[in-house]
Image: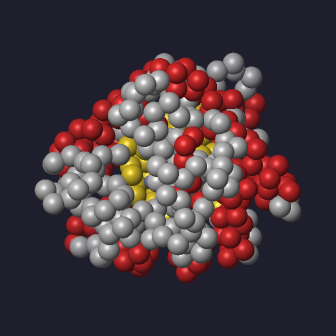
Amino acid sequence: MFTIDAHLDLSMNALEWNRDLRRPVSEINAREKGLTDKPDRGNGTVSLPELRKGNIGLVVATQIGRYVAPDNPLPGWHSPEQAWAQTQGQVAWYKAMEDDGEMVQVTDLYSLEAHVEVWRNNSLEKKPVGYILSLEGADSIVTVRYLERAYQYGLRAIGPAHYGPGRYANGTDATGKMGPQGLALLKEIERLNIILDATHLCDDAFWQALDNFNGHIWASHNNCRALVNHNRQYSDEMIKALVNRGAVIGAALDAWMMVPGWVRFKSTPKEMNCNLEVMIDHVDHICQIAGNALHVGIGSDLDGAFGREQCPYDLETIADLQKIPAILQKRGYTQQDIENMMHGNWLRFLRNAWK
Ligand SMILES: [Zn+2]
């Protein structure tokens, strides 16, 4: 079934993990044998051939570059300008993938419909993977005026926050409302009709953003606090508010966000019973709150600084997202519901945002 994944850190993998994503996952992993610089070495699940194999024809692909103040222990750049430069390298990689026929950028209704048509009807041997460019964490937007420059090279979604304190908004594990800069950024996001990604906003910033932003909001990769209690997850009230705004929430496949009690670098997916069924528990929770299956999709975050050691054990590569429709069917979802969750909800959202 045609599938949309609303959150993949493709350029980060290419440039920081040094993965040539045109190669098969098995080859990428084999080349990482013996490397110990990152905990997920040799455990990758994502590459462009695997996306094609899994009929995942459209993804939301990120740029990411954090700024850290001297007292911030998180990894990141020491100035916003360095973070901006990092994200420009990431854009250059996406453009090189376009030049090579591997990917194609989707930026508006016309390119969206044309791309969906290619995946629906075209028998091309190697279909280009469509991508909508998103920025995870806005620290690299040096000043609010930079956002229009980003729009010009195709940026169509932005999450103002990531982990910790942000220049515009505080994120996961942080607290506190946005100041004048954050509010000015929201205004500019709205003016440019860029989609606001509510994922990673801390609770204070989340509610403030909903009150101050009148454009289109989605949550690209977010699970439920009721099932795994952590500030990174959404409370039922937050889910309700997003549903009321017409948002779609992408279910994420990072094990610690799926099963309670996950201990990083210690727990294993098998012993924690972390499989794709658990993802459907989160999906189902959102559907129960919404009263329908119209507000949830996939935002897997696969290879977002974790690999097979920290994702469902019944997923070997991202192509295994194709196991999800059968599980949904077993849970009593209709064919229409399943198509909506695999791609239809994201498509409806985009068609509405770009009309
Ligand atoms: Zn994230």
The N terminus lies in quadrant: top right
Q: Position of residue 101 (x, y in %)?
A: 53, 21
The reply to whether residue 338 is in sight is yes
Number of marks drawn? 0
Q: Residue at point 37% right, 77% down?
A: 204
Classify residue 330 as left or right of residue 248. right
Classify residue 104 as left or right of residue 67. right
Q: Tell me, what colour scheme is on the image? A: secondary structure
Q: Residue at point 22% right, 72% down?
A: 180
Q: Nearer the viewer, residue 228 or 21?
A: 228
Q: Residue at point 83% right, 61% down?
A: 331
Q: Position of residue 73 (x, y in %)?
A: 23, 56
Q: Nearer the viewer, residue 152 or 304?
A: 304
The reply to whether residue 111 is in sight is no
Classify residue 301 as left or right of residue 141. right
- Determine whether 234 is above or below 120 in the image: below
Q: Can you tell which quarter of the image residue 176 is in?
A: bottom left
Q: Residue at point 70% right, 39% down?
A: 320
- Determine whether 178 is above or below 73 in the image: below
Quadrant location, ligand no. 1: bottom left
Q: Position of residue 145 (x, y in %)?
A: 23, 54
